[in-house]
Image: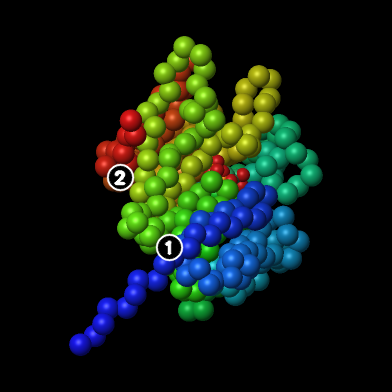
Amino acid sequence: MAVPAEPVALGGVSLAGATMGTTWSVRAYCAPTRNPHALHAIAQAALDDIVAQMSPWVEDSDLVRYNRAAPGSVHALPEAFADVLRCALDIATRSEGAFDPALGALVDLWGFGPSPSRHRIPGDAELQALRMRRGPSLRALFEEDPPRLRQPGGVTLDFCAIAKGHGADLVAHRLRAANVPAALVEVGGELFGYGRKPDGTPWRVVVEGCAEESNPRPGTEPPPLRTVELDGRAIATSGDRWHGFEHEGRRLSHSIDPRTGRPVHDAPVAVSVIEASAMQADAWATALTVMGAEVGLAFAERHDIAARFLVRDGERLVERVSARFDDLSEIAD
Ligand code: ADP
Ligand code: MG
């Protein structure tokens, strides 16, 4: 008769580091004999791979080489790059163009990219010229088996609205492959969790879009505190709490509306999305920010997307959630 194995006691590990101009962290449970330095190296290596392939700030990244390549050249894509591009193309189509992974030149023009002319207002002629220059659709330039992308001249990719999410997914994937049974991975605020804690419960996180939620203005009621369980699930939040800049008293969003070529006007304070992967959640959070709370919420309802919009109503912060987000979250008391 088989004797049941002694359950292995799991030990908690916390890891942290820096990547993509922001920070990352991991909380995990694994056998207490595991060396945390080795786990740290696995996570950092996964993120370094993404930076080496997709950073617009790294001179010889695959993305920069593609953006600068001669018209007509064809580029073999590394695996992670191809995964991100497939997801970006899919969400670009499904969001009816609100998400656009080929906005690099516009992002730069508005000063949110790697170009040194930070935070200046481009003229109408400049914007018009850039929008005219946009070539054939990206999908038409992409070929599978093996994955390759043609540069017709002037196409500038920008994966900044999706790469952090992919980072969280990839770190989780590699930790799981290294026999770590449960981890909560966070990259720049985007989260992916899998597995169960030793007490059998999944990871539970608080949904937060801006600091004011936990520290409301005097005399105003904050939106309800929500928690989400992440067991093979992700949540990402778009917001302008760190980026964006002021111009003539108006706050310019770092999310660009591809239809106008301009920063989103009156962007929601924050948009959070729950998805099966952090990559999808990250991209949808940007797409719904571009649509705005009104159109975005109706879109999320139509497409059964779990989204929460945090918007300003006078002095108050209020939340608006899709039915799916309400289902997947719990209001804490
Ligand atoms: P947030 O946390 O607010 O989502 P991200 O860093 O994830 O911020 O994404 C913002 C970045 O995404 C911008 O700096 C720009 O590089 C890129 N971006 C801006 N607008 C779009 C868009 N409509 N579609 C895809 N990427 C965009
Ligand atoms: Mg994002």
Q: Secondary structure at mark 2?
A: helix
Name the side, left or right, on which 148 lies relative to 275. right
Q: Residue at x 52, y 32 (%)?
A: 210
Q: Residue furthest top?
A: 219
The CA span between labels 1 and 2 is 20 Å
Q: Quadrant of the C terminus?
A: top left
Q: In the image, which disc is placed on residue 328?
A: 2
Q: Nearer the viewer, mark 1 or mark 2?
A: 1
Q: Is residue 275 above or below residue 292?
A: below
Q: Secondary structure at mark 1?
A: strand
Q: Nearer the viewer, residue 212 or 162?
A: 212
Identify the colour scheme used: rainbow
Disc 1 crowd, CA 10 A, few/some/many (<14, 14-19, 20+): many
Report the residue marked by disc 1.
Answer: 182
Q: Quadrant of the N terminus?
A: bottom left
Disc 2 crowd, CA 10 A, few/some/many (<14, 14-19, 20+): some
Name the side, left or right, on which 76 lies relative to 6. right
Q: Quadrant of residue 206?
A: top left
Q: Is residue 101 above or below residue 211?
A: below
Q: Residue at x 73, y 33 (%)?
A: 120
Mark sitting earlier along the chain (1/2): 1
Q: Is residue 126 above or below residue 3?
A: above
Horizontal and vertical percent position of residue 186: 53, 52
Name the side, left or right, on which 234 lies relative to 57. left
As shown in the figure, which amino acid type bears the numbered disc 1? Ala
As shown in the figure, which amino acid type bears the numbered disc 2? Leu
How many labels were placed on the picture? 2
Q: In the image, which disc is placed on residue 83?
A: none
